[in-house]
Amino acid sequence: MKKTLLIIAILSSYVINAQESISLSLEQAIDYALKNSYASINAERDIDAAKKKKWETTTIGLPQISAKIDYQNWIKQQVSLIPADFFGGNAGEFVEVEFGTKHNMNATATLNQLIFDGSYLVGLQSAKTYLQISEQAKEKTELGIREAVINAYGNVLLSEESIIILEKNIKTLEKNLEETIQIFKNGFVEEENVEQLKITLSSVKSNLSRAKKLKNIAYKMLNITLGIEINSIVTLTDSLINLAAKNTDLQLLTSNLLIENHIDYKIAKNTERANELLVKLEQSKALPSLSSFVNFGYAGFGQNFDFLKKEQQWFDSSLLGISLDIPIFSSLARSSRTQQAKIELEKSKTTLTETAQKIALQLENAKTEYQYSIEELETSKENLKLAERIENKQQIKFFEGISTSFELSEAQRQLYTMQQNYLQAMLNVIANKAALDSALNNPINN
């Protein structure tokens, strides 16, 4: 019984902890995602891997020490034939001789040191460039994460606001329907008016059901973007209307960008640098390489395996050497590889020019979209006010018997459309502000 209660308590604690909610403003959500999102974590790992790769390349030019132990056991020793007259025997005859001992053991240690290699020097520069590429990729990833969080956060707020509005509309429609039914029972309106309101109410309820399902998906999408468990409970502390107001900044439309500071340009520039190093690498392969080594060894021999005994005799040896490798003729293979590298370099230069133009166009487009979204927000706000007044007047006219249920339904559908347009306009301002910040290479949304 005690064990059962303990298990229940543990499970209850787990459920409670699993349901703990995280409260986040938009800025907090961005900060959280930059540290915990899956893309951010992997980008950081790429930098760590690049650092390890850089050190791996560096170690090529550092001393390398290796050790080796060889043991040989002649199960059947090799026989050599030696002229018999060498030992005083008959000319033309051979004596069978076995050289060496049955058991042999050699232990050697070798120190290798690279003295000069053009490829190694270029490799060091390439490793540094590779690390820079990884760091820039992380910067690019963070800009993408920031924009993705803003969009996901905004979509959740949009779904929340849509549900609130739809539930409010349903209450109004249900009240209108109830009043219309009573009027119909008293014989003052036709049944068609009741049916028309029922159609409208059914349509709005269907939209509400869909909005609730989309809300669930929007929250899960936000969780994935943040890098937390998909079913975790997240509470958003910012509102759609406040974020729209906060992200309305006309001064951004006059902001300029130094192309050289944009992350896409820096990445393209680094690619050009990498191709320059590739050309140097192919050219360096025509240079001689120089290395040296020092070898120390011990060898032991015997007819029995006595190598672990103190009586075993060991013979030491040492060797010092220098190796110079001089490329002379490669049938123009090196020249061909160098020309290929130069072609890739020219391509990267063209790509750099194209990237600069694309960045300028992207900024211009982002400013246009942002300005339009601000103007559209003001327009949709005014349209919503007009639609509310029209719908209110149609309600009064309908219950006074001046207008038909069809005219009321049209006014209501127009109101519902304007409500969604207003919500979408606020979301567009937030999203387009994020896109403009990315175009301006602004990493933080203040």
Image (cartoon, helix red, strand yellow):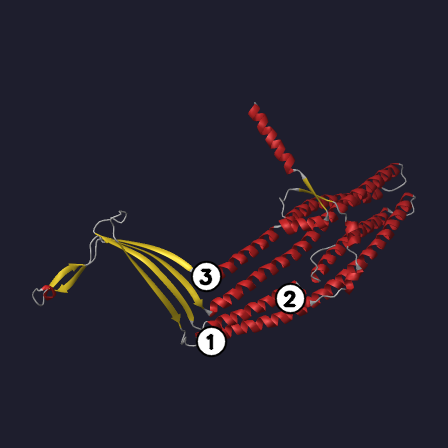
The residue that mark 2 highlights is: 265
Q: Quadrant of residue 19?
A: top right
Residue type marked 2: Tyr
Q: Please name the residue shown 88% across and 47% down the image.
A: 392
Q: What secondary structure is marked by label 3?
A: loop
- Judging depth in this view, the residue of 290 and 22 nearest the camera is 290
Q: What label does residue 201 carry, if any? A: none
Residue type marked 3: Leu
- Judging depth in this view, the residue of 95 and 216 nearest the camera is 95
The residue that mark 3 highlights is: 62
Q: Residues within 10 Å of mark 2 (few under 14, many from 20)?
A: many
Tell which tag, 2 or 3, sits nearer the viewer: 3
Decide which of tag 1 and tag 3 comes sooner along the chain. 3
Residue type marked 1: Ser
Q: What secondary structure is marked by label 2?
A: helix
Q: What label does residue 335 carry, if any? A: 1
In space, the residues marked 2 and 3 are separated at their CA atoms by 35 Å
- Judging depth in this view, the residue of 311 and 255 nearest the camera is 311
In space, the residues marked 1 and 3 are separated at their CA atoms by 30 Å
351 above or below 376? below
Q: Please name the residue shown 52% across and 60% down the image.
A: 54
